[in-house]
Image: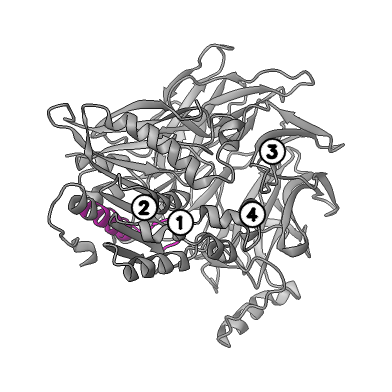
Amino acid sequence: MSAFNDIRDYVAIPRVLSLKLAPDGSRLVSVVQSLNPDGKSFGTALWAVPVDGEPYRLTRSSKGESAAAFTRAGDVLFTSARPDTTAKDAGEEVPALWLLPRAGGEARQVAARPGGISSFRTAGDVVVFASDVLGGEEAAEEERRKARKDAGISAILHEGYPVRYWDHDLGPGRTRLFAARLGADRLEDVRDLTPDPGEALRDATFDLTPDGATLVTTWRVPLPRGEVRTELVAIDVATGERRVLFGDDAHDFGGPIAVSPDGARVACSRERLTALDVPARSELWIGDLATGEGRVYAPDLLFHMDVEWAPDSSAVYVAADHQGRRPVFRVAAGEDPAEPVRVTEDDASYLGLNASPDGRFLYALRSGVGIVPGPVRIDTAQGGAAAEIAALPSPAPRPELPGTLTEISATADDGVPIRGWLVLPEGASADDPAPLVVFIHGGPLGSWNDWQWRWQSWIMAAHGYAVLMPDPCMSTGYGQAMIDRGWGDWGPRTMADLDVIVDAAVARDDIDAGRTAAMGGSYGGYMANWIAGHSDRYKAIVTHASLWNLEQFVGTTDAAMYWQRELGPAGSERYAKLSPHLSLGEIRTPMLVIHGDKDYRVPIGEALRLWWDLQRTEVEAKFLYFPDENHWILKPGNAVAWYETVLAFLAQHVLGEEWKRPESVA
C-alpha cells in the first residue's frame, strides 16, 4: 500500500531538510526530520551522507539537532537544546552550540547563552552566532531572566513596530551577534559585535569572509510611520566597526547572502520596495566588499532562492524559479555582462547548493512536485550542455507515487500563457473520469514547483482526486511582466487566469467537470474566498489561513508596512475593489474554513470574522480551528486532522457522500 493512502503513514515519512558539504568534499551532513516514537511530534537528527557511500546517522537526542555546518577541520557544529551532562546546572533548555568531532566520539557543548543560539557561521577558527539578549549588564542576564519568570511577568513594553512575528511575540530581548574563536574544548574570546542593535538584527541573514575577518549581515533600518528597509552591512570581527555595504532608499538588500571564496565580493538579493504602482522585483546583486560598489547580474533571473560561488570566484550558481521548476543557473561574475547558463535541464527544483573544492561538482537537494527531496551530485564539467545529475543514497526513503504528473497550459484573455501541473490518480480515464481539486498557491509571489509536505497533492490522488496546481498572475518564474499584470488587481486578474486553465483541465476526458473543488492557503485562501463570492463553478471551497477583510488584515498582520505599500492606507479605493468580504451576499458554495490561532501573518481575526459572516448569512460551512498552530499546520496529529477533515468535506460535497465526522476531530 502507498504511504499516501493512510495519512498517518504519510506523516511518518522522514524528511531531508538541509545539506552541507565538508571542506575536503568527502561527505555531506544533513538535518533529517522524522516522527518521534510518541507519534505526537517530529524530531530532528544529523546524518552523514558520504559522496561515495551509504548515509549513516550521526546524532540522537530527544531535543533534536539543527543548523549543521562543518568547521575547517571537518568537525560538525550544530545547535541543539539537548542538556549538557557535563554542567552542574543545565539551566533553561534553550538551543546551544555543539561540536561533533570528525574523529568520532560524543558531541560536546562549546557555547551557550541564556537566550539561546539561533544561527551561526564559521570560517577558519572564527565562529559568529546570533542570540537573544536582554538589556543591561551581560553577566546578570541569566538572573534577570529568572527574576522575570519567578515574578510571573510576561508583559512587554513596546516603543516601535512590529510587536510580534509569524507565531511568536517579539521582545523583551533583542538579537545580537557574537564572535568567538574555536578553542580546544569551547569557544574562546567571546565578544559582542553588536552591543546596541535595537531591532536591526531581527531574522538577520549573515555570512563570513573565508578568513573570518569580516561579517556581512542584513541590518534593518527603522523609518517614519512604522516603515522599515534593510541594508547589508560589513562588520569588522576584530573591532566591531560597522559600515554600510549596500543600501538605498528604493530597495531592500538581503538573503541569500554569500561571500566569494577570494573574500572580495558579496552576492545577495536586491528587492524593490513596492508601492501602489510599483510591483515587487527581486534581483541578483553582486558587489565589491571593499568599496560597496555593485550591480545587478542576470536581470531576467528573478526571485532566486539560493546562491553558491564557484571555488575560483569567477561565477555564482543560482537556483531560481523558472516555468514551474527551479533550475540551477551559472552566472558569470566578471565585468562583462553575460547571459546565465542553465545547468540543470530536468523538471526538478534545487536548493542547498554546495560546490566541491575542485569546482567540478555541485551537491544539492533535488525535489519537485513529484520528487521527494533528496541529495544529488551535479557534474558541471560539461560547459553549456545539460549537466549529468546522479542521485546519492538518501537518509530518507523515496516513496512510490500513486498516480502520474503531467503539464497543462492555456492562454489568458490578454494572450499570456498560463501553465500548471496536473496530478492524475491511477485509473483516471474517459470511462472513469476523476473529480478535480484546484490548489491555489500562496504568496502571491510563488510557484508550484517543489515538493509540498503540507499541501500534498499525492494524498488527494491516493483518494481518487485529480489535482490542478496552476501558476496564475504574480507567480514567480515567468518574468517581471507576469507579476506586473496582477499587481493591484489580485482578485479579478488572478481569477481570470485560473478560469482559463481550469477550463483546459475539465475539457480533458479523464476529468469530471461536474465534480470540482477549489482550495487555497494564505493568498490562495484569499483567492478561495474571492472565488466563493464571484463564481458558482465549484461544489466546495476550502479556505486556509485566508484573508477576508483586507482593511482589517492590513491593520493586524505582523507586516502591515509591506501590505500597506501595495493596498494603500485605510479607506483607499483598492480595499473596496479587492476585499472578498464585500461579496459575502453572493456566496452559495459550501466552505470549510481552517485557521491556526498562532498565525500572526494572517491573524485569527480573519477566520473569526469570515466564520461569523458565513453563519449569519446561513452559508453551509464548517470551521476547523487549531489553537496551537501558526500559518502552517506542523504537528503530526494536527496534520492528520487537517487531511481527514478536508477529505471528508470534499467527499460530502464533491462526491455526494454522506457527511462523516473524522475520528481525529470526533
Q: Is residue 186 magenta?
A: no
Q: Is residue 641 magenta?
A: yes
Q: Within 10 angstroms of label 3, few (less than 14), some, or many (20 or more) residues? A: many
Circles 2 and 1, Cβ within 8 Å, touching? The answer is yes
Q: Residue at x 62, y 28 (%)?
A: 301
Rendering coords of residue 343 (x, y %): 55, 20
Compared with 332, 16 (above or below) is: below
Magenta residues (range): 629-648
The residue where tag 1 is placed is: 580
Between the residue at mark 2 and the residue at mark 3, the CA separation in whole angstroms equals 40 Å
The residue where tag 4 is placed is: 562
Q: Amino acid at mark 1?
A: Pro
The residue where tag 2 is placed is: 532
The rendered magenta stretch, by its main secondary structure, is classed as helix
Viewer-nearest of discs 4 and 3: 4
Between the residue at mark 4 and the residue at mark 3, the CA separation in whole angstroms equals 20 Å
Between the residue at mark 4 and the residue at mark 2, the CA separation in whole angstroms equals 26 Å
The residue where tag 3 is placed is: 268
Identify which residue, 86 or 167, lies in the foreground: 167
Residue 414's disc is none
Q: Amino acid at mark 2?
A: Ala
Q: Residue at x 23, y 34 (%)?
A: 402
| Disc nearer the start of the sequence (2/1) | 2
